[in-house]
Image (tube, helix red, strand yellow):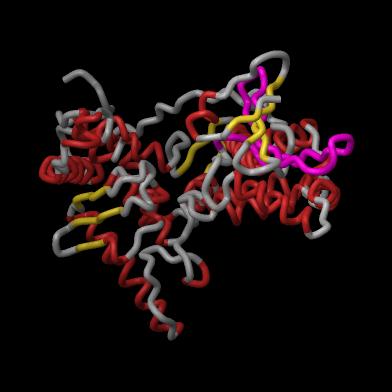
Amino acid sequence: MPTVELTDKFVQSAKCLSGRKTDYFDTTVKGLVLRSSSGGQKTWYAVYGPPLKRQWLKLGTYPEIPLGSDKGARQRAKDTRARVGDGGDPVADKKALEASQTVADLVENYIARRTSNKRSSDEIARRLRKNVSDIIGDVKLAGLHRRDITRCIDAVKDRGAHIEANRVFEDIRAMVRWAKGRGDLDDNLVEGMAKPTETVERDRVLYAEEIKIMWAALPDADMRESTRRIIRLCLITAQRVGEIAGMRRDELDLEQRLWTIPATRSKNKREHSIPLSESAIAIIQEQIAAVAALDDRKDRTPSSFIFPGPGNRASVTGGAIPKAIKREEVIKRGIATILGIAPWTPHDLRRTAATHMEEAGISPFIIGHVLNHVSATKGTITSRVYARYDYMREKREALAIWADRLSAIIADKPNVPPRPNTAP
């Protein structure tokens, strides 16, 4: 049992010297131990009590729990010794907590402490509560087993929701890793478990005739008018449905015909400015007017969201739009259609816009900037650090060309190729 001064540099390079594990006792904080296993995992412990009755309290894993900081291993070890000095027994307390804490408690703790600042927090919370808490929420953490996790995933797969099953699995995996890093769980129960379903990358693109049919059928769809407007904007702007649904008034400069998504709402965490075509502005202005009229009728404070959800306190969620589209699915003689064409999703509209822009001769690099793809906006050290040109002129031109092309498709004007990527 080596005794060393634990430093950040030492902890990073610490290895198992022999056997299954090596314990390094810190000389700075009494009772702090770094355990390095033969598999490369590093775990913090606070050790206390006489040699024959020594207690080992797991504090978490490295690097999830760092050495320093007010929540680091050293401070946790000091807090543990203070509790022992006051007559407490942290190991017994932890066992009692594990015996009482349930999976539902873990889910709520994870949502509050880990996912609340994420862009997709609402969807993560919905998935975990519906697919985990509702099924195994009463299972005690001390008795949680892989078969319980499998039960949650199988329930989703049995509904035929294979993509949802993958997302639930990823949510559970992230939650379990977080819990293990904190010391709430001693084992990573999902380690070695395979993804529930192997998904195939979608390549659905709506060709010109499909766009015309879908657009014409949209006014009669059984959905809110605001949902129809979001769908149209997905196709016109080529932006993500969640970012459109969450659009805020302070992100818009309609005089400059510009919509700026802040880094906090952007998928790649970089501010993204989208030039707006006349058709996009018209849709946004229609929505603003409709919301203002509703606010007047209900005598309530105007919402900061362009597409407010129920209660006016938050925006409609991006996940609500695919569901509204899916409800329009009709199966006749074994063939499924949505608004008169083969099934499609909001993301397919984004891909469709990109494909038609490329067919119109727009550079894939510029399309990448329109889409705010990481590969285009920060694919190299040069683009990440040095190149600050925003390609606004090129993006505006690309979206204007696409808007004109889309108008021609909808109006069924000649000289619009029937399918994307067809030879001239």
| Viewer-proximal residue among 16 and 129 | 16
- Residue 261 place in picture, x, y as percent: 30, 53
Image quadrant where residue 405 sits: top left
Q: Quadrant of the N terminus?
A: top right
User: Number of callouts in the render?
Assistant: 0
Which residue extends farthest top?
18
Tell me the residue at 60%/45% (across/down). 74
- Residue 9 place in picture, x, y as percent: 48, 30
Could you tell whether 21 is left or right of 255 in the image?
Answer: right
Observer able to see residue 57: yes
Tell me the residue at 52%/72% (across/down). 311
Could you tell whether 331 is left or right of 406 in the image?
Answer: right
Tell me the residue at 72%/40% (across/down). 58
Q: Is residue 111 above or below residue 34?
A: below
| Viewer-proximal residue among 217 and 235 | 235
Tell me the residue at 53%/43% (across/down). 329
- Residues shaded magenta: 35-63
| Viewer-proximal residue among 208 and 68 | 68
Q: Quadrant of the C terminus?
A: top left
- Residue 28 place in picture, x, y as percent: 60, 41
Could you tell whether 261 is left or right of 126 in the image?
Answer: left
Q: Is residue 55 magenta?
A: yes
Secondary structure that dominates the magenta span = strand
Image quadrant where residue 143 sits: top right
Q: Is residue 411 magenta?
A: no
Which residue extends farthest bottom?
299
